[in-house]
Amino acid sequence: MEQAVVPLIAGVAVAGVAAQWIGWRLNIPSILILLVLGLALGPVFGVVKSDAVLGAIMRPAIGLAVAIIVFEGGLSLNLRELRTAGSGVQRLVFLALPLNWLLGSLAGHYIGGLIWPVAILFGSILVVTGPTVIMPLLRQSKLEPRSAAFLKWEAIVNDPIGATLTLLILSLLILLHGAGGHAIAAWSLAGRAVLGVLVAGALGLVLPFGLKRLFHGDLTPEYLKTPIILSLALGIYAAGESIQSETGLIGATLFGVVLGNIEITGLQELRRFKESLTVFLVSGLFILLAANIDPAVLRHISWPIVLTTLAILVLVRPIAIGLATIGARMTWKERLLVGWIGPRGVVAAAVAGLAADQLGAAGYPGARLVLPMVFMVIAATVFLHGLSLGPLARLLGLASGSPPGLLIVGAQDWTLALAGALRPLGVPTLITDPDWQALRPARLAGLATARVEILSAKGEHLVDLRDLDYVLAATDDDAYNALVCTRFAPELGRERVHQSAPDPEGPHVRTSREWRGKFVSHPDLTNARLNALIAEGWDFRLRDAESIATSEDLPAHHPFLVIGAEGALTFYSDDRDTAPAIADRIVCFEAATGRRKGRRGLIARLLEPFRRAPRAADAEAA
């Protein structure tokens, strides 16, 4: 049996990552593919039985994986979001959770036919909306920041609270049923739960500030920072678990939240590593838990279970969210979206399996129905909410429905002309520059601008990247352009980050492709050359493929950018072979002649007072 562990783990890893790639490629939630794959491998065809292979280590391994997932989710919780979504988040945590518990228990009893103790436990399991499902869905749906904050905060904060609540109720039910209802045993269990929460919570709140001092200066090498943080997250989780099960998740979550909101070096590398690790863990957990479902569980699915699931979907959560958010600073559209979207994930599945086994062993009638009921809710919410989040958000105007957009870093004459040419073609653009005067011509032209340093913390907070899928860094500093591309490459993809061609006579040192973006257009078209040609009357115009001719020398109609049928942007570059299709549109940089050239010169003269003033060093050199 030990020999089967390695093929199982390796096979699940390969299948999980493949499912993630297929979901990205087909633009569908990868969670759906993972769930179907797990069911096919487990209860349907019987290829994988994870519990039989992993044995006693499966539950602790799941707990450690979930601890890392909620810690990574805590890192993404920005306390600045509470300024705009604070009252709504508080209602979702402190009011919606008990209301969901109450209404879910009522549905389990009156519709599902569960006895009251089992129904109360069933209701507590379903108060969680797991970050293992919500975070991948938010990544694909391009939800606007406020609505995304509501769903993200609810999922990450309620997940450990709901798990702790469920385990506390489960232990109380077992003690009351088996020990004759002795109050001493119940109080002992409650005390351990409170102590576990306090210990794990205190460690999660205090240790980040100790790390800040440890990472200051030269006290810790860079290669040890990420291992130290991960080991502390797991240690905090283990400290809580050693006192009472599931209390460690609260400490891991708090550790992530505090760590993500204090200035500490090394977090950028941790976030990138943690995101990859979380994708890996979520993929494996969903496949393993779905494959571990006993086929008998599926045979127990009946009409009462189906009706209970429908009640949870269309009555319990919408009513609970509606009542909890009365008077909150949430629009009716936000309340409707949050009331519908509430997928359950790994924590609900893991706790349900444990609860069904222990309640059944304690002699509670109907305990075997808990697992099929929870599984039905998980499957229904993953499928329905996963498929409907994007369309519903776009219908309500809470998500981007626009084509892919371009973030332009650096207000040059030629970048303003490019943004102006792309606007009538339906391509969203945003020009950022810390120089107010440099942005003035763009503002006068009605282009979208942001006066911000894009690499600053303020820039990351203010610039909404939902509609911006491509980056063009075009400042006068080639090294800075490469740094911008390196910053956005992990998020957008290296094929979508570009920078202007370097000045061959400048101090530029050609960097490795790993540390820069793709150079756009002809190597001779540097910032200075493009700006000079704009002053001479050149401009960006739309052309068809048949009218384009390229050569080694700069032609009169130089192809610059291809706009695909679905809005995808492809810059001409020496770093890639660009072969436009017949349906593509080509934006060319071309010379202007005659009357049009004179009109262009007039516009340039009118805007000349608003252009960037020369720097002192440049003036002295002149």
Image: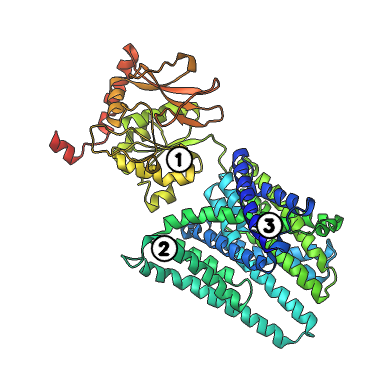
Q: Nearer the viewer, mark 3 or mark 1?
A: 3
Above or below: residue 564 compared with residue 486: above
Identify the residue under disc 2: 225
* Element under disc 1: helix
- In this rendering, would 540 be left or right of 217? right
Q: Which residue does the numbered mark 1 point to in the structure image? A: 494
Q: Position of residue 365 (x, y in %)?
A: 85, 71
On the rendered structure, is 534 left or right of 616?
Answer: right
Name which residue type carries label 3: Leu
Tag on residue 288? 3
Mark 2 residue type: Lys
| Front-lying residue, 526 or 613 | 526
Q: Quadrant of the C terminus?
A: top left
User: As displayed, is residue 420 above or below residue 492?
Assistant: above
Q: How far across and how far down the image is residue 450, in percent? A: 39, 42
Quadrant of image for the N terminus: bottom right
Q: Quadrant of residue 603?
A: top left
Answer above or below: position of 270 versus 171: above
